[in-house]
Image (cartoon, rainbow, N blue to C red):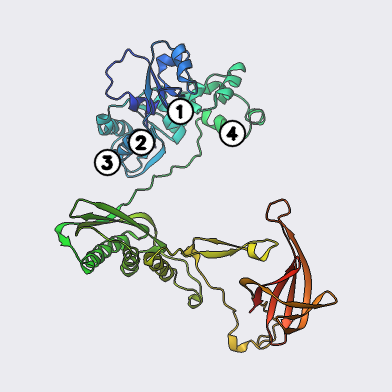
Amino acid sequence: MLLCLHVAAFRLAVARRGIDTPDDLFILADKADRGRVLEVDDRARALGARPGQTVLQACAAAGGARVLVHDTSYAHTVWEDMLDELDALSPLVDDTAEGTAYVEMRGCDGMASDWIARAHAILERFDLPVRAAVGPNKFAARAATYVRDGCICASGEAAQLLAPLRLEVLDVEPAILERLHLLGISTLGELARLPHGPFVRRFGARAARWHECARGIDAVPFRPRPYALQIEAAAFGEGSAAQEEQVYFALRVLAERICSDLSRAGKAAVLLRTTFECENGDLRELDAGFAQPTADPRVVLDILRAKLEGLIFDAPVTGLKLQALRLEECGTFTTLFSGTQPDPQMLAIAFERLQAVGDVQAHQAHVRPAHLLESRFAMSHPDLSHASVTLSSAPLAHVVEGRVSKGEERTYASQLRMLPVREVAVRLRGNAPVSVDARPVVKCAGPWRVDDGWFESAHVARDEYDVLLDGGMLWRVYRQGEKWYLRGAYD
């Protein structure tokens, strides 16, 4: 049996807390001027005010209504506090939406009426119109709150108990409700009596769930909400650190505390935040991310040291706090031959140290399709979470002239290394290069016509050649206009 705690029009109920004027009509909007209506109370709805209207339209329909502005962060904080209080009732709480929660009561002491009474006692301090009911599934338990507060719906009585309720309990779109009303269907009982197949064919696949809910059937599983685990360590009031070594020692102590807590919880940190409090009152926050989730204090300290190498404090540090902001399950992916992969954490430390030295930005090249050689790669910030180096699966000693010891044929493509563009002297014979910078050409391939960017201002049109020189050098040269240029060399 599931216990449902439901607050109708939750956002409006939170906004009305502390307002002792029960005779007023209330409208909740996203903003006071030119805003949209989010929720209305029953009296304003009876006069014609509806969610989705403008504030002006709703006030015209419900004359004299009081407009309240929705505070998203405040409403979310109130709801999270209510969920935390429900932990005293049962550790299994399903947070479906703000204003509706389900509590798994299997194995809890007492009867259903006792659970409802305890839930009201726990949430009484929030001063909200909380309704509680018990049902065999999530929809039946929530719909039972509309029947009456404290309703207990047995598994075999759901369809009969919910039959008088109006279709608005289903949270169906207003346009669909109007179509159903035109067909003379206004209650769950009337909907349940419709034949399933024709109803679903007319209103779509979603109508199958509406029909099942009207009969008291709900297959949506119970999903307990995850608990937000916060791990942090702090050192305040233990003196001041005026030297770099003192700060590092304090960070090492905090890193060991943090990693010990992470290990006990079976978690690893992805992001750490360090807060420094200085003697002159300054506060400075420093975020440090990791290439892979870690709970190793040595890795944490190395990353923090790399981050701190470029910082200068104007006063001694009197307080430190280290927080693990993002946690993941412990464990990292690896391969069978892990020796062929660099350590992502060591790469991350190297990049942090490079950036601490000065304005040095590390970048990673990505190959992309393009006609121009210089456009075939792009630079981006390196992603070290999946850093790897792909090596040949055959030992280098077994590779001779492109063959593996087992006789398997393999080909190894030469890699074109981009060089600074410079003009070269090319002598032609029959429209083909025979020498480049006075070096004889042994073999030539090309030309390859490149005509790119004709629709842009930087139009490029040129002929490219691969030339093998007598010294063994393989170059990529191109002709643009009447001049020749060196673009790259093959390794």
> Residue at (35%, 36%) from the top-left corner?
73
Identify the image quadrant of the N terminus.
top left
Q: Earlier along the polypeptide chain: callout 4 or callout 1?
A: 1
Q: Which residue is mark 2?
A: 73
Residue 88 is marked as 3
Identify the image quadrant of the C terminus.
bottom right
Question: Within 10 angstroms of label 4, few (less than 14), some, or many (20 or more) residues?
Answer: few
Quote the CA–CA distance across marks 4 and 1.
24 Å
Q: Which residue is mark 1?
A: 157
Q: Quadrant of the rendered structure where residue 255 is?
A: bottom left
Quote the CA–CA distance across marks 3 and 1.
29 Å
Q: Which residue is mark 4?
A: 206
Q: Classify 122 as above or below 146.
A: below
| Residue 180, percent from left and from top | 59, 21
Which of pointers 3 and 1 indicates the residue nearer the eye? 3
| Label 4 residue SS | helix
Q: Are marks 2 and 4 in contact (CB under 8 Å)?
A: no
